[in-house]
């Protein structure tokens, strides 16, 4: 169990460069129509808590320890309620199930993350021998990414590039924000550096915000919150990353059904869907993510219906 505090939230923000005002203890009320009446925890921070609980389970379960050897780790988060300071956070992990087909093997474990015993996130943790998400099309060549300018559209594409760096100190702080025992991942006395999966994935929030700023979206008048996250990361590549290694995160445009019908700030828009792909040292992606966001305007409108 984790007793969420504002300090946990601040540490998570600082370690991932997430400047979203939803998490700001002094400025959350700047957001127009904010229904939460206070700061809320980060989605990826809660994902870090889920990852940690799954790791503890794997250490004490022969079956889960076996699937930990699979190269790819996937998560599916469906956000149903927020987590706020002073909430008691816990995770209920269900019995895992196997599935296979077309050469793939997947071990899925359903979970419910609860805040004060009420569901906040419902989802799945999946271990697989293949990526559980398809690679988007029309991506720029990986070999040219390091030479491209940060926070710009890759030439000839509509993918926004955000360059981040793997920092051991930030990863340790991220673990602390999720209530995880840091020495299980990082221990200088044994020369152990195993970045948690949710640390590089958590940098997606910063990349999404940077793209919104690049597009001149007013994040105060038109804030958005996570609705779902589908994530898959290459654990083998992650193991090879060290402090100061760059990762290039590509953030795609809105691909929702009404992406072209309504602008990003339209009060009629009910969701935004964006695909993100990150590359580290290899030609293959470090992670793939499909993110669905809900404009706060749509929730405010629903509350008045």
Image (spheres, grey):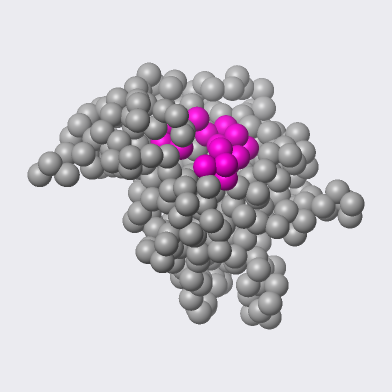
Residue 255 point in image, percent of width and height: 34, 39
| Residue 175 on the magenta segment | no
User: Residue at (70%, 57%) from the top-left corner?
Assistant: 181
Is residue 247 in view from this perspective? yes
Direction from residue 234 to residue 211 in the image, left or right: left
Residue 190 point in image, percent of width and height: 89, 55
Is residue 291 in view from this perspective? no
User: Residue at (65%, 50%) from the top-left corner?
Assistant: 175
Q: Nearer the viewer, residue 150 or 96?
A: 96
User: Residue at (39%, 21%) from the top-left corner?
Assistant: 215
In the figure, residue 258 lies in which quadrant? top left
Extent of the magenta region:
6-23
Count of marks placed on residues: 0
The residue lying furthest to the front in this view is 86
Q: Nearer the viewer, residue 70 or 210?
A: 210
| Residue 7 on the magenta segment | yes
Image height check: is 86 above or below 65? above
User: Residue at (46%, 34%) from the top-left corner?
Assistant: 25
Question: Most prominent secondary structure in the magenta stretch?
Answer: helix
Direction from residue 19 to residue 164 in the image, left or right: right
Direction from residue 214 to residue 164 in the image, left or right: right
Q: Quadrant of the C terminus?
A: top left
Q: Quadrant of the N terminus?
A: bottom right
Residue 80 point in image, percent of width and height: 34, 56
């Amino acid at each position: 169990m984790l007793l969420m505090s504002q300090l946990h939230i601040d540490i998570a923000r600082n370690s991932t460069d997430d400047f979203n005002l939803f998490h700001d203890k002094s400025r959350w009320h700047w957001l127009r129509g904010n229904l939460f009446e206070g700061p809320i925890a980060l989605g990826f921070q809660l994902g870090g808590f889920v990852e940690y609980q799954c790791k503890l389970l794997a250490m004490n379960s022969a079956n889960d320890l076996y699937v930990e050897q699979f190269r790819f780790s996937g998560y599916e988060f469906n956000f149903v309620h927020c987590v706020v300071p002073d909430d008691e956070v816990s995770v209920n992990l269900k019995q895992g199930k196997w599935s296979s087909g077309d050469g793939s093997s997947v071990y899925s474990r359903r979970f419910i993350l609860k805040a004060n015993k009420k569901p906040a996130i419902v989802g799945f943790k999946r271990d697989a021998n293949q990526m559980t998400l398809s690679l988007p099309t029309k991506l720029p060549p990986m070999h040219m990414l390091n030479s491209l300018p940060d926070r710009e559209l890759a030439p000839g594409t509509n993918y926004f590039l955000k360059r981040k760096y793997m920092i051991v100190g930030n990863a340790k702080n991220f673990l602390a924000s999720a209530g995880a025992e840091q020495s299980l991942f990082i221990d200088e006395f044994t020369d152990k550096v195993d970045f948690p999966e949710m640390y590089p994935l958590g940098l997606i929030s910063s990349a999404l915000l940077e793209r919104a700023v690049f597009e001149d979206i007013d994040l105060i008048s038109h804030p958005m919150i996570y609705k779902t996250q589908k994530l898959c990361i290459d654990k083998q590549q992650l193991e090879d990353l060290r402090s100061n290694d760059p990762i290039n995160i590509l953030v795609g445009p809105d691909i929702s059904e009404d992406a072209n019908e309504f602008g990003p700030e339209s009060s009629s828009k009910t969701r935004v869907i964006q695909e993100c792909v990150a590359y580290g040292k290899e030609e293959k992606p470090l992670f793939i993510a499909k993110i669905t966001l809900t404009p706060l305007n749509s929730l405010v409108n629903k509350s008045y219906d």
